[in-house]
């Protein structure tokens, strides 16, 4: 499981049949500090309804991808598994 920042959506006119109807996101993995980039951006299948600018948890768990897509054979490697809550200070400000 890794933290990442959603930096955009992806569309594809030609894609693997298991991706038809799936929302694709481009995410930037983050280092443990949650701020600095960690590697190149990744293409992920969105399972949680995340949007641009949100921080998400992503996984490369193949079993989770197969369960999400309801298939035993898919090229999907990364999927979202959660959206981080926004932290607030004691006065309720982000």
Image (spheres, grey):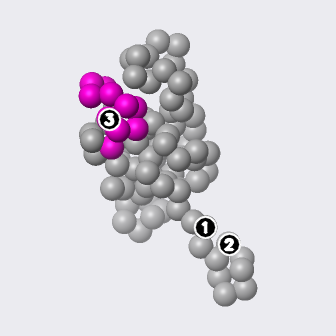
Could one spot residue 75 in this view of the protein?
A: no
Q: Where in the figure is residue 37, as x and y percent of width and height?
A: 42, 54
Q: In the picture shown, does residue 61 fall above or below 92? A: above
What crowding class fits label 2: few (fewer than 14 Cα within 10 Å), some (14-19), or many (20 or more)? few
Q: Are marks 1 and 2 in contact (CB under 8 Å)?
A: yes
Could one spot residue 40 in this view of the protein?
A: yes
Q: Nearer the viewer, mark 3 or mark 1?
A: 3
Report the side of 13 relative to 18 (left or right): right
Question: Between 66 and 51, which is closer to the camera in this rendering?
Answer: 66
Q: Which residue is mark 1?
A: 86
Callout 3: SS: helix
Quadrant containing the C terminus is bottom right
Q: Which mark, by number, is residue 66?
A: 3
Q: Residue at x 53, y 56 (%)?
A: 83
Question: Between 31 and 87, which is closer to the camera in this rendering?
Answer: 87
Residue 1 on the magenta span: no
What crowding class fits label 3: few (fewer than 14 Cα within 10 Å), some (14-19), or many (20 or more)? some
Q: Which residue is mark 2?
A: 94
């Amino acid at each position: 499981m890794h933290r990442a920042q959603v930096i955009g959506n992806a569309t594809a006119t030609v894609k693997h049949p298991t991706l038809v109807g799936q929302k694709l996101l481009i995410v930037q993995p983050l280092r443990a500090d949650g701020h600095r980039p960690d590697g190149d951006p990744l293409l992920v299948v969105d399972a949680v309804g995340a949007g641009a600018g949100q921080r998400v948890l992503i996984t490369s768990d193949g079993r989770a991808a197969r369960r999400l897509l309801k298939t035993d054979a898919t090229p999907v490697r990364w999927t979202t598994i959660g959206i981080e809550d926004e932290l607030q200070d004691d006065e309720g400000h982000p």
